[in-house]
Amino acid sequence: QVQLVESGGGLVQAGGSPRLSCAASGRTFTSYAMGWFRPAPGKEREFVAAISWSGGSTYYADSVKGRFTISRDNAKNTVYLQMNSLKPEDTAVYYCAASTLEGVVTTTPRWYDYWGQGTQVTVSS
């Protein structure tokens, strides 16, 4: 079992740069690819960003590419989402998730096995 706890959300002005953190505990964090997701109209959860277990590979949704950066510190069992140039449409609850698929980094929510409770990011214009 893996427990994930997000933090770092809040009310931010458009153009702001908050950093979300996701602290993991439980089973071996370094075995898992990690992802960030947010709700979207017509979807259960929309892919935002993902990172391989080593941190060597990263993936982004087109809507955040060039503005958001995902990273991880395996020594601290933590994954981060640096959010830059925020827009009002980025307002959402952001969820951290862990995937146990071996050798694969997936952007599909159903392949993620563990989820945090989410952290709200509200962007004011």
Image (tube, grey):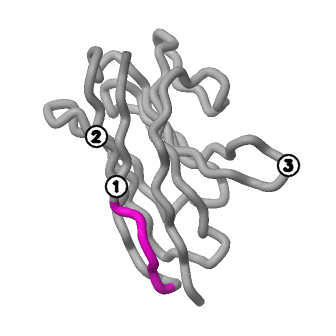
Q: Main secondary structure of the magenta part?
A: strand
For residue 8, side relative to residue 106 (left or right): left
Nearer-N-terminus badge (3/2): 2
Nearer-N-terminus badge (2/1): 1
Circle 3 residue: 42
Q: Nearer the viewer, residue 1 or 48?
A: 1
Q: Position of residue 102 (x, y in %)?
A: 47, 9
Q: Quadrant of the C terminus?
A: bottom right
In percent of the image, x 74 and y 41: which residue is there?
44
Circle 2 residue: 23
Circle 1 residue: 7
For residue 24, side relative to residue 114 (left or right): left
Question: CA gap, disc 3 to disc 2?
Answer: 29 Å
Q: Which residues are magenta?
A: 8-13
Q: Secondary structure at mark 3?
A: loop
123 is within the stretch colored magenta? no
In percent of the image, x 37 and y 35: which residue is there?
4
Q: Nearer the viewer, residue 57 or 117?
A: 117
Q: Nearer the viewer, residue 74 or 25?
A: 25
Q: Position of residue 39 (x, y in %)?
A: 68, 51
For residue 73, side relative to residue 98 (left or right): left
